[in-house]
Image (cartoon, rainbow, N blue to C red):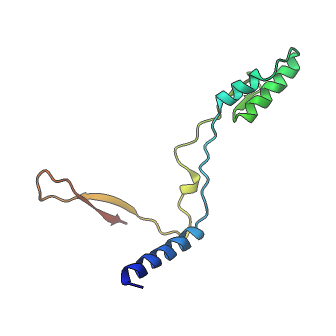
């Protein structure tokens, strides 16, 4: 192999090893599919109020909604917080923050370098 091919092969092997050892972080944000809910509600004509409530709850949950018993209606799931717990610093994991440092010298040319902080 040439040195370029060897370098590429080594990079692929290292990347595959890094991915294999990294647990997947699920970022599924609950989302209410209102169109699915509406289609489900149109699919059944129930005259009995208790059957109608049971069917409405089923359509709500099947479409990703949250049933509110006190209001007797389907609602969108609560919004997620801005900080994701999967990104919290874990013991034994080395982290660093990179901040841009402007480089001056050429008027009209905007460049920056990243330096490790901490």
Residue 113, image quadrant: bottom left
User: Outermost residue, bottom direction?
Assistant: 1
- Nearest the viewer among 81 and 3 is 3
Q: Is residue 97 visible?
A: yes
Residue 47 to residue 65: above or below: above
- Nearest the viewer among 75 and 109 is 109
- Residue 106 percent coordinates (x, y): 11, 57
User: Outermost residue, front direction?
Assistant: 1
Which residue shows up at 42% across the image and 85% down it? 1
Lateral position of residue 107 relative to residue 30, left or right = left
Lateral position of residue 59 relative to residue 106, left or right = right
Lateral position of residue 85 relative to residue 105, left or right = right
Which residue shows up at 82% across the image and 18% down it? 45
Which residue shows up at 61% across the image and 43% down it? 29
Residue 104 to residue 58: above or below: below
Lateral position of residue 63 relative to residue 107, left or right = right
- Residue 34 percent coordinates (x, y): 65, 28
- Nearest the viewer among 90 and 54 is 54
- Residue 27 percent coordinates (x, y): 59, 50
**Number of marks in the image?**
0
Q: Is residue 72 visible?
A: no
- Residue 96 percent coordinates (x, y): 41, 64
- Nearest the viewer among 75 and 42 is 42
Which residue shows up at 58% across the image and 41% down it? 80
User: Outermost residue, top direction?
Assistant: 47
| Quadrant in which the C terminus appears | bottom left
């Amino acid at each position: 192999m040439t040195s370029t091919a060897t370098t590429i092969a080594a990079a692929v092997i290292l990347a595959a090893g890094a991915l294999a050892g990294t647990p997947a972080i699920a970022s599924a944000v609950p989302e209410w599919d209102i169109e699915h809910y509406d289609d489900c509600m149109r699919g059944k004509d129930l005259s009995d109020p208790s059957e109608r409530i049971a069917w409405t709850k089923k359509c709500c949950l099947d479409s990703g909604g949250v049933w509110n018993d006190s209001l007797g209606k389907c609602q969108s799931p609560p919004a997620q917080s801005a900080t994701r717990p999967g990104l919290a610093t874990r013991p034994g994991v080395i982290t660093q923050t990179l901040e841009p440092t402007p480089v001056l010298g050429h008027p009209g040319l905007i460049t920056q370098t990243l330096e490790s902080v901490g």
